[in-house]
Amino acid sequence: MSKNLLLVSITLIAIIVSAVINKQKTALGLRRGIKMFMALLPQFLVLLVLVSIFFAFVPQKTLASFLMQQAGWLGIIVTAIIGSIALIPAPIAYPLTGMLAQNGVPLSILAVFITTLMMVGILTLPVEKAYFGLPLTILRNFLFLVGALIIGLLVGVIL
Amino acid sequence: MKKISDIPFGYIVALIFALTSFVLIVLEIPFGKQLVREFTAFSSEMVIILPCIFILIGLLDVWIPKQLIQQHIGEESGFRGAVYVIMLAMFQGGPLYGAFPTVHLLWKKGCSMRNVFMYLGAFSSLKIPMMLFEVNFLGWKFTLARAAIALPVFVIIAYIMARYARVKGLQMKNLTYKETKGQQ
């Protein structure tokens, strides 16, 4: 919550400072920002609906207890799939992984989970597609999925 | 009169979602309540984050000179340009969907595709606010190891993506064009 408050304060200060320097430019900037927001609102709504459906089916508690049972190769792949689909903000994701670590979940699995969670976004595909088009979006997510697996495996080897 | 096909897909999806949730709640099926609860949880965050991000992007759009971006992180920026975008991304926070508007602005101002993907890579794995959480819950050894391996991985991915985009002639979508088309 405090992080959101910080963002709101920064935004308000930016608007005020900008308006003091140049009112016309500020008005133009606000118009452009709002226009872009409106243009992308449909994609963000799809994202919201997908996230709601996903977590209604798989509550975070279920997700945690499921991840707790993962181990070995299959565990890494299953975790990569879950991390790619799920969309969990960092302030919630890290306490979750901390708890998993205490419950003996291997570090390589945690690394794969975090990396896929942050880098690969199946649910954010509609939004990403609006910016990058389908080919770049698919390739980026695929490459980051492979990258996440490499990162997870190497972390497991090192630690 | 607007045709139904003119209504963006997202609004239709949202409408169907709202109606379905409503029906489920009226029928007292517990899944409906779960849907609404998850929707409220995530939308309460997005309702604050998204307008702020887009307002900031709009303001940066009018204030940042194109020349500045083009010169420092543009096509000719080389190694130094990559370092700049990675450092820029490290000081950001928030979810990945918030980074897309930012890279779009950078790209519009002349940032190269390679650096766009560098930014996304660094944003998703080297963000300082995120790593502070990580150190807290998983320890600094884990955090350092993960970050040290992630850096070369996403640098390589950025090069592959940039090369693929160049060969196929792909760029980011020009959203302003879409807007003017919609106004006709």
Image (cartoon, rainbow, N blue to C red):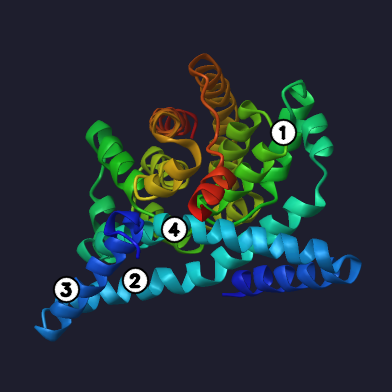
Q: Give the residue drawn at x 76%, y 29%.
A: B81
- The answer to whether residue B166 of the structure is visible from this angle is yes
Q: Which marked residue is nearer to the observer: mark 3 or mark 1?
A: 1
| Residue placed most toward the observer, A63 or B74 | B74
Tell me if mark 2 has few (under 14), some (14-19) or many (20+) residues whose alpha carbon lies within 10 angstroms of its own: some
Residue position for label 4? A93
**Residue A37, how many percent across, how many down?**
54, 60
Give how far across and how far down residue A70 sits, in percent. Answer: 25, 45
Position in image of residue A38 (x %, y %): 51, 61
The chain letter under disc 3 is B
Chain letter for mark 4, please.
A
Measuring 70% from the left and 33% from the top, which residue is drawn there? B111
What chain letter is assigned to the residue under label 2? B
Point out the residue furthest to the right here.
Answer: A21
Residue topped by disc 2: B39
Q: Mark 3 points at which residue?
A: B31
Q: How far apart are marks 3 and 1 (CA)?
A: 47 Å
Q: Where is A60 relative to A132, above or below? A: below
Point out which mark residue B110 bears.
Answer: 1
Reading the chain from its start, which is encountered first: label 2 or label 1? 2
Q: Is mark 2 on a helix, strand or loop?
A: helix
